[in-house]
Amino acid sequence: MAIVRPGFEGRTEDPEAIHWYSRAGALKAFGNAIVPEVAAEVIGAYMDCYPDPDEQLRAALATN
């Protein structure tokens, strides 16, 4: 897999313009970049914005 810098086409004279890396290695590195405390904050914020649809359904059924 190759990453091409923006503004460059796939073929260039600049040897630094194309970087080859292992997809599996990159995915492992991305996984290691997750900070549990930050992930918990993001998930909590998401859950505050988007309540559980099952809970809303139970509340609607309970009122009927």
Image (spheres, grey):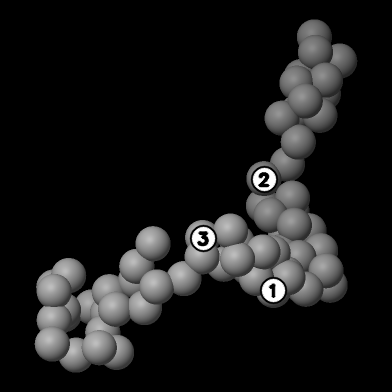
* Pair 1/3: label in front: 3
Q: The C terminus is located in which quarter?
A: top right
Residue 31, quarter of the rendered image:
bottom right
Q: Which mark is residue 23?
A: 3
Location of residue 38 in the rendering, given as x and y in whole percent from the top left corner: 76, 72
**Residue 16 located left or right of residue 60:** left
Q: To which quarter of the image does residue 30 belong?
A: bottom right
Tell me where residue 22 appears, x and y as whole percent.
51, 65
How would you rate the neighbour count of disc 3 (Cα within 10 Å): few for under 14, some for 14-19, many for 20 or more? few
Closer-to-camera residue (26/34): 26
Which callout, 1 or 2, points at the residue further toward the start of the chain? 1
8, above or below 23, in the image: below
Q: Position of residue 50 (x, y in %)?
A: 67, 45
Which amino acid, mark 3?
Answer: Arg
Amino acid identity at mark 1? Ala
Provide residue 14's location: percent of width, then percent of height: 19, 90
**Residue at 69 percent of width and 74 percent of height:** 33
| Left or right: residue 21 compared with residue 41 | left
Between 54 and 34, which is closer to the camera in this rendering? 34
In which quadrant of the rendered view does residue 26 lie?
bottom right
Q: Which residue is mark 1?
A: 33
Residue at 27% across / 74% down in the picture? 4
Q: Which residue is mark 2?
A: 50
Element carrying mark 2: loop
As measured in the structure, the alpha-carbon distance from the residue carrying label 3 to the one carrying label 2 is 33 Å
